[in-house]
Image: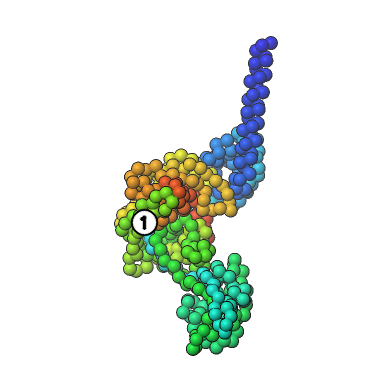
Amino acid sequence: MRAKKIFKFCYTVTALSALALFGCTAFFASSIPDSFTVTDESTVQGLSAMPALTIVKDEKVNANGEGGNGQLVFANIFPVKSVSITSREDIKVIPGGTPFGVEIFTSGVMVVKTEELASNGRKSSPAVDAGIKVGDTIKSVNGDVVLNNSQLSKLVNKSNGKPLVFEVSRDMQDFTTSVTPIKMGENNYKIGLWIRDSSAGIGTTTFYCNENGGFAGLGHGICDVDTGGLMPLDHGMILNASIDTITKGIEGTPGSLNGHFELGAVGKLNDNMETGVYGTVNKMPDNLENEVSVASIQEVKTGKATLLTTLNGDEPGEYDIEIESIGYDENNKTKNMVIRITDEELKSKTGGIVQGMSGSPIIQNGKLAGAVTHVFVNAPDKGYAIFAENMLSDYARSTGLYDEAA
């Protein structure tokens, strides 16, 4: 009788523990994506960051890129939620870690600041009065396509104070508005805007793809320094770059990799997206033997990994890091992991993660797992990283990767 009671007690505790674990897992599963990409034909794939969960595919998902449905399952028994599954090819890429220079020119000109103009005893901003805001992109004036700052100034000066029809883009939507310039001097008219038509900087290459001669870098988009908005790309150039010095990061003040561009474009930029910059290069790196697979998001796990980045010249080094946590928020594509620099050499030289290191590839279990994107200003040995699969997805759209590979 006593043995029967012990068995019943143990059974109850086990059942309650399993139920509690299932409840917690189900709660966290609500933040897990509703769709996954797979690269093999196995029917079950584990979710590395949450080992109790597995993705069970149905028979419709195959290696030909066809989609299908599946289930997120707890302990290989309890279904948690339905998910959609797409198969993709196991594309090989060459991890970067090398610095590159980039110069981009906007599609139209971006409004970075507005100001009031004093004329005839009153202050006003004709552009603001016409509904133009900081972050807007001016595409044309009276039907003339606006290519740069100087062209817009000339068009405004030629108005002689007559209304001009501006075509403006805001949040991917275009609209027109009438702007009447104010005379500010002899043959000098203004509309109360500060604008920008280009940007340049240094970042780190995440990967090259020999499949179609492309490249990906930064892990986040190039944003305007004043507005914080993604700069609309018309065209851009990729240049070789070299790191000269390091400004070490300290708590409260981010450091930086300091370098210079080399003359002559080595490629062109196709897209400036939330997840990075994408383009094509004139020549692939020589180290094709270093090709690796891109890890699916479900393969990335907490624990040890390595970081490729360049601290001097143009030759990358490999440094130890720890992936401390993983998040699956589909609305935040660039902050999927929290990483910590554990390599003492890297910390002694940079203090941790510094500006210019964005895009540095993260290798885990022989696959490209992600790339550095942001530093924690008050804890420079820590920062965010993006899933490599998020970058591969946008890279494929930008360069037609799967179309080329088909």
Q: Looking at the image, which residue is at 47% across and 72% down?
A: 197
Q: Looking at the image, which residue is at 44% across and 67% down?
A: 199
Between 228 and 199, the residue placed more toward the observer is 228
Q: Is residue 220 above or below residue 55?
A: below
Between 83 and 120, the residue placed more toward the observer is 120
Using the rendered image of the protein, determine whether residue 18 is visible from the camera's viewpoint: yes
Q: Which amino acid does label 1 sit on?
A: Leu
Residue beneath label 1, please? Answer: 257
| Rendering coords of residue 402 (x, y %) | 51, 58
Count of numbered labels shown in the rendering: 1
| Rendering coords of residue 186 (x, y %) | 49, 89
Using the rendered image of the protein, determine whether residue 59 is visible from the camera's viewpoint: no
Secondary structure under the numbered disc 1 in the rendered image:
strand
Q: Residues within 10 Å of mark 1 (few under 14, many from 20)?
A: many
| Rendering coords of residue 113 (x, y %) | 52, 70
Q: Looking at the image, which residue is at 49% across and 51% down?
A: 386
Q: Looking at the image, which residue is at 52% across and 48% down?
A: 336
Q: Which residue lies furthest to the top in this view?
A: 1
The quadrant of the image that shows the N terminus is top right
Between 316 and 257, the residue placed more toward the observer is 257
